[in-house]
Image (cartoon, rainbow, N blue to C red):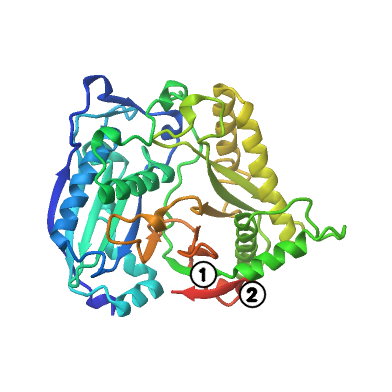
Amino acid sequence: MASQIQVEIISKKIIKPSSPTPNHLQNYKLSFFDQIAEKSHVPFVLFYPYDPIKNKNSTTDSMIQKLEESLSRVLTHVYPAAGRFHENKCSIICQDQGVQLIKVKVNRRMDEEFLKQAHNNLDLALQFWPQGIKDVDATKLVATPIMFFQIAIFQCGGITLSTSAAHFAIDGWTNFTLIYEWSKVCKFGTPAEKINFMSFDLANIFGPRDITFSDETEPLITKLVAKKFVMDEVSVSNLRDELTKGNNSSRSLYFKPSRVEIITAILWRALLRASHAITGKMKPSVLSFPISLRGKLKYRETINPFGNFIIEIPINYEPKGCDIELQDFIILIRETVQKTVDFVSEASVDEVVAMVENLYNKSYGGTEWGASDDVEEFACSSLNRFHMQEADFGWGNPNLMHFGSRDNQVFWLYSTQCGNNIVVQMDLKEKYMDFIQHDQEFLAFTKLRYG
């Protein structure tokens, strides 16, 4: 049925800040962390079915008008998002050039049948990414909006809201926080002068550096398959109890792992079992584990800055025979991440920069790990602390959300709407996905599968 869905562009327009950006803010300096970020656009989409009770006093047109007006007010605060990259790629010219807003119509109702289809066919979401983002590359950054938004209007009045941001200037925290705060501004009618949820001075301490990284990640050419799994909280909890019962056995952990640590370890171990089955050998592996540095450093400018402020922590696994013990992965994840967090909490700015440069060049660009076909590379991103499931613009919470652009092998973790379970969205090579969805050791920790 996916082939029967038609998405037709109604209009494209530029949304500008509701108030002009002051002269002294019109040259926003990019930071060191923007400098090392990927140059791609990162999309996601939220699905909002029409709710006749919550929308009894509004039409689809009035809802969209409120979206546009509130976005304009938010952009007055988040002014770099409405600018354009300078040719030197070291700054953003903030002269209220605006963000792109695309409106499209869909020849379907967002009913239970469609939502079931969207749950089970994750590629359906690709039809609702903002139009044209696949044409954006590093050579077109100067002339391209930094953020794209798209509203898809269904026949019943339901909508999808999708956004795509240039990772060169905006990380996941910035993107998701902007959307969530925008939803509150839209719902409650917050005036522009009272919107204040980010700072814009990270480059004052982490300015661009004269450095070169070995790694420039290219999207995989191989087609990737996307599926979702709902992890079983009871099974995960029982496993945690077993691993921490303190009987001094070889399986016992010396700490109580988080759900994210346990699930990440389960997934990573399953992926390496898949690699072993497909290639016939146990390969070393690098897991990219991004953490936000906000609130983890001793500097005022690092509490809630706009832009990129994450470290893609490389967690390196060297196989020792064919036995893959789960607790080894949990310990590796905990100790690698904690070592980084402990270091940055006391480090100087120069020490943080040197650490990041060393990590990236050694693990992502080095011949031993990042530049070898004999190393399995995966990425994990935990979104549990974001409030995207609660992004209520005035017509209720989203029923469904999807992430990513199918460019790299990655899995996202986020909480279900009730908060009791964790959903995993996985983008994998087809052979790996075929193995995963039949791997009984992995499936023992899941309760539902979509896709």
Q: CA distance from mark 1 to mark 2?
A: 11 Å
User: For residue 174, which quarter of the picture?
Assistant: top left
Q: Quadrant of the N terminus?
A: bottom left
Disc 2 target residue: 444
Q: Which residue in the protein does label 1 denote? A: 229
Instruction: Specify whether residue 82 is in view.
Output: no
Work out which quarter of the rendered image holds the C terminus and state it. bottom left
Can you give x and y, in whole percent of width and height, for residue 332 in the image? 70, 50
Q: Between residue 309 and residue 271, name the one nearer to us.
A: 309
Q: Residues within 10 Å of mark 1 (few under 14, many from 20)?
A: many
Name the N-terminal-most of marks 1 and 2: 1
Is 302 placed above or below 98 here?
above
317 versus 449 height, above or below = above
**Secondary structure type for disc 2:** loop
- Which image quadrant for residue 63? bottom left
In this view of the protein, can residue 355 be seen by the observer? yes
- Asked if the residue under mark 2 is in contact with the one under mark 1, i.e. CB atoms within 8 Å, the reply is no
> Residue 170 location, x and y as percent?
37, 40
**In-front residue for pair 218/154:** 154
The amino acid at mark 2 is Ala
Q: Position of residue 82 (x, y in %)?
A: 24, 37
Q: Secondary structure at mark 1?
A: strand
Q: Nearer the viewer, residue 288 or 184?
A: 184
Residue at 71%, 66% (x, y): give it.
239
Amino acid type at mark 1: Phe
Q: How many numbered discs, if any?
A: 2
Residue depicted at x 14% and y 57%: 62
What residue is drawn where x is 67% and y is 38%? 339
